[in-house]
Each structure stands twice: as structure tokens, then as C-alpha cells.
Amino acid sequence: MFDRQGNRKYLNTNERCLYLQSIMQEENETRRAFCLTLFHTGCRISEGLNTTVERLDFGQKVIVFETLKQRRRGCFRAVPIPDSLVILLNHISSAKTSSALVWNFSRSTAYRLVKRHMVEAGIEGGMNSPKGLRHGFAVACIGKTIPLTSVKKWMGHARLETTAIYLDVTGEEERNLAERLW
């Protein structure tokens, strides 16, 4: 999971914690809910912004995303979310119609929001982006021994080989995997 210059492309465990601490300080609960959704689901920024109220399944505690990268419409996936996010999303969406978008800001505003929290968290480098957050989610799943098939589904990948790139970790994540052998 490196770019062509050899830089890590995902947030490690410590950086994910720092990012989470930063977004928990966000006073605007709609913006905080958006950042938490990216953090807890690994969705693409455009998939998050495209989410309507009817795609929030509070009974099952999932968000149903339309996968936007498989070159055809109508591919959906349900990603589990923690109770705290269920409560927050229920609160911010309760006054909206079922077909309304959960978040009413542009892609560039969403991107700047994520970047601002990355900077506030002291995260620098190629992983300082929504995509780095997405990659970090997948690496965290692997580190918690979530089956690769579940990670594939949650990430919205068409092929398991695409998801398998997240097995190529370094540093602390690689050491944690190796320690399972010892």
C-alpha cells in the first residue's frame, strides 16, 4: 500500500485514533456525522454524499451505499455502523424526507472538511486524504481479523483480488499480524 514514491497510502492505527479525536471535536453534528460515516464505513466520499435518508437502516444498524465504481447503477452494499453513529444519524435525519440527501454539501466541501481534520490531527503525507482514510479502514479491518470477504463487501469491491491489496501492510500493522505467529 505505497505510492510510486514509496509513501504509505493508508492511515495507521495511531493516525486513525488522532483523526477520530479531531472529528469528535467538530461542533457541527452534521459535519461530524459525515466524517464519522467515512471513518466507520470506509465508503468513498462520493458514496457518502450520495446517501439518502431511506438508505439509513436504523433497525439493522447499517448504511446502504450504492457502489459507484462498478460502472453500473444499482449495486448496493450494507455496511454496519456503531450504535453511537446510529443515534447521531437518526438525530440529524429525523426532520428530512426519506428521499432527501443526508448531507447537503458539495464534494469539494466534504473533501476540505476531511482534510481539515487530518491537519488538526497532525497527519501529514500521502495518506492525508479521504482515500487514505478509506484505505486505513480496510487495513484496520484486516488487523482486527475481519474476513477478507466481509471487507470486500463493505468496501464495494467487485473482486477479492482488489481487497487483498490491504494485506500488504507495514510497520505496526505488519508487526501485529506477525505477532499472531509468536
Image (cartoon, grey):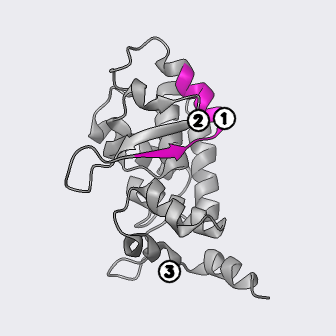
From the viewer's perspective, is residue 148 above or below residue 118?
Answer: below
**Which residues make up the magenta segment?**
77-90
Q: Whole-percent x and y of residue 74?
A: 27, 43
- Asked if the residue at tag 3 contacts the one at tag 2, i.e. Cβ–Cβ closer than 8 Å, the answer is no
Q: Is residue 87 magenta?
A: yes
Q: Residue furthest right?
A: 182
Binning the other alpha carbons within 10 Å of mark 2 as few (below 14), some (14 to 19) or many (20 upward) gives some
- As drawn, the residue found furthest toward the left would be 71
| Badge 3 density bin: few <14, some 14–19, many ≥20, Cα 10 Å | few
According to the image, label 1 marks what residue? 83
Mark 1, Cα crowd under 10 Å, few <14 / some 14-19 / many 20+, is: few
Of the 4 image quadrants, the one containing the N terminus is bottom left
> At 64% from the left edge and 54% from the top edge, which residue is drawn?
17
Residue appearing at x 41%, y 71% in the figure:
160
**In the figure, is residue 45 to the left or right of 141?**
left
The label on residue 49 is none
Say the numbered circle drawn on residue 61: 2
